[in-house]
Image (tube, helix red, strand yellow):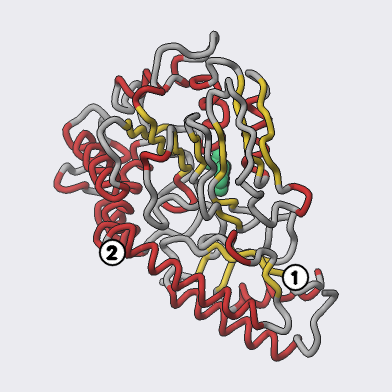
Amino acid sequence: MNRIYNFSAGPAQLPLEVLQEAQREMLDYRGTGMSVMEMSHRGKEFGGIIAAAEEDLRALARIPDGYKVLFLQGGASLQFAMVPMNLMKNRVADYIVTGQWAKKAAKEAAIYGEAHILASSEDRTFSYIPDLSALSVSPDADYVYICENNTIYGTKYGELPDTKGKPLVSDMSSCFLSEPFDVTKYGLIFAGAQKNIGPAGTVVVIVREDLVTEDVLPGTPTMLRYAVHAKERSMYNTPPCYGIYICGKVFRWLLKRGGLREVGRANAEKAKVLYDFLDSSRLFRPTVTGKDRSLMNVPFVTGSAELDGLFVAEAAKEGLVNLKGHRTVGGMRASIYNAMPKEGVEALVRFMEKFEREHGGERHGV
Ligand SMILES: *Cc1c(COP(=O)(O)O)cnc(C)c1O
């Protein structure tokens, strides 16, 4: 077996233990004689799998009663539509645009109503989180929307905006369960699985009960109503069974690691190894500085597109793969989600040091 360090932004590396356990259970799930992919979603075994996944997620994130947990399909992007269809009663919402994902979400919401851009960091390629101190939240806004960790640009909110009492909706896809967070500060949280918790397609939604109503925008399909999925406990139709099963194993793995406080501590320590190196490097430069830095996605450049390309190619030969940055930023990006061990980041830094010695006599183009 030859496992590499996969720095992909998503679908991303999953914990080896989780994959191995799934492998052991692949052909015969706990004496049932079948795989989880082959069993009825209405049966007792799968009932146990989804119930345990929810219970473990509730324990991990300390999700209070009063919040529903839904396992849905369509990835994070379908939430860009489901959120306004279900929540935009006044047809007004405020969006803080800190990257491509928030921008797409705002554009989708504009199909259904007025999507105000409260603040944006597009002027500097989304390399920072805008000042949140004087937001003019619309008096009739149905919610305020943020993308909490910007996967492409490597920024994360250090504090949440004051929404003046409006429900806060957060796309947590790329920082979900990476550190402790206070669910009660949010109206709705969603996270596509393939960044930090499981296979693509599955999306977890945590939503405050008072926001789950039958009062949705006219024309909202049955499948896109939170109330339908909440009532049927994510079993209105066949849920993404295998995805939920893997997510459940990841939740269990996180609990075994000591929960989110411990996971957050480990993530901070891991990210520090890379940021400390970047801050002192003669060749590599981080594109985000200071308090807005993400612990999950770390973009960096050399200043020379040619050297960037060489770096990505040479790193891959060393088993450090998927380091190419997003096309809108260029350069490199190391995604170091929960499943990336500290050894992976240390191996990356060692390789960067070597590359710097060979190519970094002077800084290129900065
Ligand atoms: C990847 C990502 C998405 C899109 O996820 P899909 O499951 O492909 O729709 C949305 N938001 C964020 C923050 C992401 O990182």
**Quadrant position of the C terminus in the picture:** bottom right
Q: Residue furthest front?
A: 134
Q: Which residue is mark 2?
A: 257
Closest to the observer: 96 or 15?
96
Q: Position of residue 209 (x, y in %)?
A: 34, 25
In the displayed orientation, state which residue is furthest to the right: 365
Is 185 on the left-hand or right-hand side of 298? Answer: left
Image-quarter location of ligand 1 = top right
Q: Amino acid at mark 2?
A: Arg
Which amino acid lies under the numbered mark 1 shown in the image of this protein? Answer: Gly
Q: CA distance from mark 1 to mark 2?
A: 36 Å
Residue sitting at 60 percent across and 80 percent down? 277
33 relative to 196 in the view: left or right? left
- Residue corresponding to mark 1: 309
* Residue 178 numbered mark, or none: none
Residue 188, position as x, y percentages in the image: 44, 34
Res 314 quadrant in image: bottom right
- Kindly identify the residue that appears in the image at 68 percent across and 66 percent down: 332
Q: Is residue 183 above or below residue 366?
A: above
Q: Residue at x 64, y 28 (%)?
A: 108
Q: Quadrant of residue 77?
A: top right
Q: Residues within 10 Å of mark 1 (few under 14, many from 20)?
A: some
Give the quadrant of residue 339.
bottom left
Badge 2: residue crowd in 10 Å (few <14, some 14–19, many ≥20):
few
State which mark lies toward you, 1 or 2.
2
Q: Quadrant of the N terminus?
A: bottom left
Identity of the residue drawn at 64% across and 33% down: 136
Extreme-left residue of the structure: 31
Q: Secondary structure at mark 1?
A: helix
In the rendered picture of this protein, how many numbered marks are placed on residues? 2
- Badge 2 marks a residue whose secondary structure is loop
